[in-house]
Image (cartoon, rainbow, N blue to C red):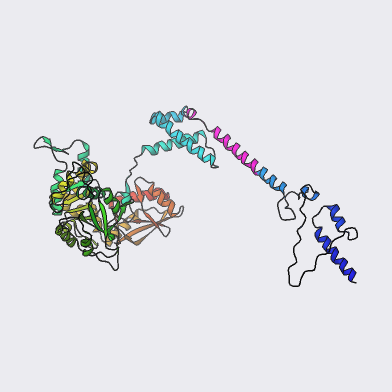
Amino acid sequence: MEASLLAGKNDMHVKTCAFGLPGGMAAKMANPGNVACPRRPPVPPGSLRPHLPLPRRRMNAPEARCSPAPGRRSTSGRRSTIERRRDIDYHRAMVLAAQDDCATRLRALPPVQRLLESEAAAALVAATSRQAVTEALRQVLDQSRAAIRGGGGSPSAEGLLLAAARRLNQEAQPSLRRTINATGILLHTNLGRAPLAAQAVQAVAEAARGYCNLEFDLEQGRRGERAAGLAGLLRAASGAEAGLCVNNNAAAVLLALSALAGTPTPGAPGHGGHGGPGGSGAPGEVPGEVVVSRGELVEIGGGFRIPDVIQQGGAKLVEVGTTNRTRLSDYAAAIGPNTRMLLRVHQSNYRIVGFTGAPAAAEIAALAHQHGLLMMDDLGSGSLHDLRPYRCPPVPTVREAVAAGADVVAFSGDKLLGGPQAGILVGREAAIDRMRRHPLLRAVRADKMCLAALEATLRLHLQAPAELPVMRMLAQTEDVLQARAERLCALLPDSVLWRIEASEAQVGGGSLPGTRLASRAVGLAAEAMGADALALALRRNRPAVAGRIAADLVLLDMIAVADGELDEIAAAVSRACGPA
């Protein structure tokens, strides 16, 4: 009995050891009578039996040379060497075939010269020029090669010529196209901000049509001062002693810092305090310090930040206070021997609410003058009127900033002023004169068309501000906007679905952040296309119609749409959606 059990154990052990060996050796080991198999030593109770490694399979063994049937994996669950090589060869062949096909299709593209010899190309050359057609064909061929390498199809010669004709047609169109603003943002920066009044447009056309006395004194018959007539209008509109205009407000701030606080440039007027004599401009003079509250270190858009503008102006920034609260004592503690200016930056494009606090402009100006320093107030959007009657919160006006004691006030011309892109500087005569004589002024001065539009805009502010488009749009009531929306819906084709809904418009352009104006919008939906496709079709129209998308509807806000533009919008919608 015991011998039988031992024989069974030995036989089991032999079979386990012989697993996977070649047939002859496995047969010998499976015969307990011919193969002597040593017995394993006894294993103590509770311990693990050591694993006996299996013999390594020889690569020339019959089992290794056998491969599974095609389409079946090996019984061990692992891919055999032959299978892996077969897959590698297959994929390599596919890649080579694809490369050969790509190379064949690239070689099949016609050369530029052959395309130029066609009748269609001759017609394009007659309408434009041979150089323009050649360049268009080269660009189209480059795009086709890139498409073929990416797996796209091969265009025909007719397709290439048609694509070149479309490119030439697009290049012949002006890049700046008239756009109807139905976004609900009055001063949309991407759409050019404030539309000009008719009087300003006429003044620009008059100045651009021919010559004008830009820097010519007609009475004396000799060279005069640029924008001499503008200075009087700026004094009347702001109550300041003098005024100056440059091409944008960022340039205005940069000029003021360079001329009044930065390291003096040799030959340029020096710096001084409130009515002081100014610096010497000697080499090695340390840059002046400009004190600003931390809560006013704004980014004005496009990545331009107040700290960068101060540094570019040759001055040194000195931060005071905290993000939400700055006291007058913080300004006083920061004043040192190199301090030249206290700068106040209005929060025209953002708001900090809650536990906040800041000294008034008059307090900062009084502190600056007490220490013989200059005080500059950057108003940003810069309004000439109290906007509370126009459903807007109170904002400091330019006249109020000048009356508060600021030596220099800077603001934009194309925001709440409703004029062209410009940076306007008003203030004390001594400070404005130093900026007028600074070398940087020539690099940032305004041209004749900007000056003409700004003069006409300022005259309207003084005589008839209601005729300015910005002021007229702000004054609209909800009843007026509702009636305009209803007139537009009456003009729309039957193929489009529409509804009128209440909306909230914005002033935009870095002006009056957080202010919402009650408005009306027409929501459009087309059965044949989605909201994105419909909005794209409207933008491709001439004139383009820019709206916004909400809840799968294209919303056309009425607050910035003129009554004369309703027919054009209806025609654009009809072309986009097709006939009923």
Q: Position of residue 295 (x, y in %)?
A: 28, 61
Quadrant where the N terminus sits is bottom right
Q: Is residue 112 left or right of residue 250?
A: right
Q: Is residue 150 visible?
A: yes
Q: Is residue 111 left or right of residue 275?
A: right
Any magenta on residue 100? yes
**In the rendered image, the vertical position of residue 365 relative to residue 157, given as above or below:** below
**298 and 497: which is toward the camera:** 298
Q: Is residue 20 left or right of residue 299?
A: right
Q: Residue at x 36, y 37 (%)?
A: 172
Magenta residues, dominant SS class = helix
Q: Is residue 455 visible?
A: no
Farthest residue to the left: give it: 220
Q: Position of residue 139 (x, y in %)?
A: 45, 36
Q: Is residue 147 left or right of residue 455?
A: right
**461 and 295: which is toward the camera:** 295
Location of residue 376 by image quarter: bottom left
Q: Residue at x 41, y 48 (%)?
A: 537
What segment is highlighted magenta in the picture? 91-115
**18 and 430: which is toward the camera:** 18
Any magenta on residue 399? no
